[in-house]
Image (cartoon, rainbow, N blue to C red):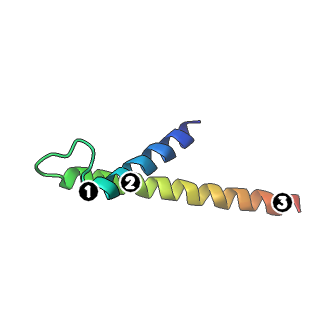
């Protein structure tokens, strides 16, 4: 449940960033927000990658 929320929130922020060109709560210096966004997206992608790998290994054990 929490993972779905995090993925949906991350995807929503990414889409909003691409559509409007602004990050949420954008300040005069958005370097911090941009870095935070990249770190959050990295962890989201890494989580999906490791989850897919775990599912693939589980399917191999069943076969």
Is residue 36 rendered to the left or right of residue 28?
A: right
Image point 20% across, 46% down: which residue? 26
Task: Tell me the quarter of the image containing the N terminus.
Answer: top right
The reply to whether the C-beta atoms of the residues labelled 3 and 1 are less than 8 Å apart is no
Task: Tell me the quarter of the image containing the C terminus.
Answer: bottom right
The reply to whether the C-beta atoms of the residues labelled 3 and 2 are less than 8 Å apart is no
User: Of label 3 and label 1, which has the lower sequence position?
Assistant: 1
Is residue 39 rendered to the left or right of residue 25?
A: right
Which mark lies nearer to you, 3 or 2? 2
**Disc 2 designates what residue?**
14
Residue 16, position as x, y percentages in the image? 35, 50
Residue positioned most to the front = 19
Residue 28, position as x, y percentages in the image? 10, 49
Above or below, 35 relative to 2: below
The reply to whether the C-beta atoms of the residues labelled 2 and 1 are less than 8 Å apart is no
User: Of label 3 and label 2, which has the lower sequence position?
Assistant: 2
Which mark lies nearer to you, 2 or 1? 1
Figure disc tally? 3
Image point 24% across, 52% down: which residue? 22
**Disc 1 designates what residue?**
21
């Amino acid at each position: 449940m929490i993972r779905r929320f995090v993925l949906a929130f991350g995807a929503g922020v990414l889409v909003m960033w691409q559509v409007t060109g602004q990050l949420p709560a954008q300040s005069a210096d958005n370097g911090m927000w941009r870095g935070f966004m990249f770190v959050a997206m990295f962890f989201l992608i890494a989580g999906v990658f490791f989850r897919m790998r775990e599912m693939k290994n589980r399917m191999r054990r069943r076969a």
